[in-house]
C-alpha cells in the first residue's frame, strides 16, 4: 500500500476533444505523476461523472505514465476549461493546470 503525495512535475498537451466531450491528453514529461483511474461501476441508471469519486481509503488503480502516453480526461480534471492545443504545465489540487 502506498500513501498519496502531490505530483511535483508533469507536462502535457491537450490534443483533441473527443466525441464524448472528454479531452485527449498527450504526456510530454510524466515527471512523478501517476494516473489514478477507477472504472465507474454502478447498478443504477448512468450517473453523471461529477457524482463519482474515490472516497478516502478506497483502493484504486494507479498507472505509471511515460512520455508520449495518451489518456482521456473530462473537463473536471483540469484547473480551467481546456482547449485543443493548450499546454498542461503541472498538477495542483489534483487537477491538471492548463497553461498557454
Image: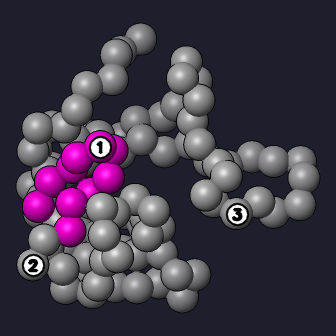
Whichever of labels 2 and 3 marks the residue nearer the N terminus, that label is 3
SS state under label 2:
loop
Query: Which of the labelled discs sits on residue 33, or is there none?
Result: none
Chief SS of the magenta region: strand
| Proximity of marks 1 and 2: CB atoms separated by less than 8 Å | no
Is residue 97 on the magenta stretch? yes
Q: CA distance from mark 1 to mark 2?
A: 19 Å
x and y, in percent, of residue 6 in the image: 22, 32
Q: Quadrant of residue 70?
A: bottom left
| Left or right placement of residue 77 versus residue 11 in this view | right
Q: CA distance from mark 2 to mark 3?
A: 29 Å
x and y, in percent, of residue 21 in the image: 52, 81
Pick the front one: 34 or 99: 99
Q: CA distance from mark 1 to mark 3?
A: 21 Å
Q: Quadrant of the C terminus?
A: bottom left
**Crowding near the residue tagged with mark 3, few <14, some 14–19, many ≥20 C-alpha atoms within 10 Å:** few
Q: Is residue 90 placed above or below 27 in the rendered structure? A: above
Whether residue 27 can be seen here: no
Whichever of labels 1 and 2 marks the residue nearer the N terminus, that label is 1
Query: Which of the labelled discs sits on residue 100, or is there none?
Result: 2
Q: Is residue 40 placed above or below 49 in the rendered structure? A: above
Q: Quadrant of the N terminus?
A: top left
The span picked out in magenta is: 89-98
Query: Which of the labelled discs sits on residue 93, or is there none?
Result: 1
**Coloration mode:** one colour
Q: Residue at x 19, y 37 (%)?
A: 7
- Circle 3 residue: 48
Q: Residue furthest top?
A: 1
Q: Residue at x 59, y 29 (%)?
A: 55
| Left or right placement of residue 54 versus residue 37 in this view | right
**Crowding near the residue tagged with mark 2, few <14, some 14–19, many ≥20 C-alpha atoms within 10 Å:** few
Amino acid at each position: 500500500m502506498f500513501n498519496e503525495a502531490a505530483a511535483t512535475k508533469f507536462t502535457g498537451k491537450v490534443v483533441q476533444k473527443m466525441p464524448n466531450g472528454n479531452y485527449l491528453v498527450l504526456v510530454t514529461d510524466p515527471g512523478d505523476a501517476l494516473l489514478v483511474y477507477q472504472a465507474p461501476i454502478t447498478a443504477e441508471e448512468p450517473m453523471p461523472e461529477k457524482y463519482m469519486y474515490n472516497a478516502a481509503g478506497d483502493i484504486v488503480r494507479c498507472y505509471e505514465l511515460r512520455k508520449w502516453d495518451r489518456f482521456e480526461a473530462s473537463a473536471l480534471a483540469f484547473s480551467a476549461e481546456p482547449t485543443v492545443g493548450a499546454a498542461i504545465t503541472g498538477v495542483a489540487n489534483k487537477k491538471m493546470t492548463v497553461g498557454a
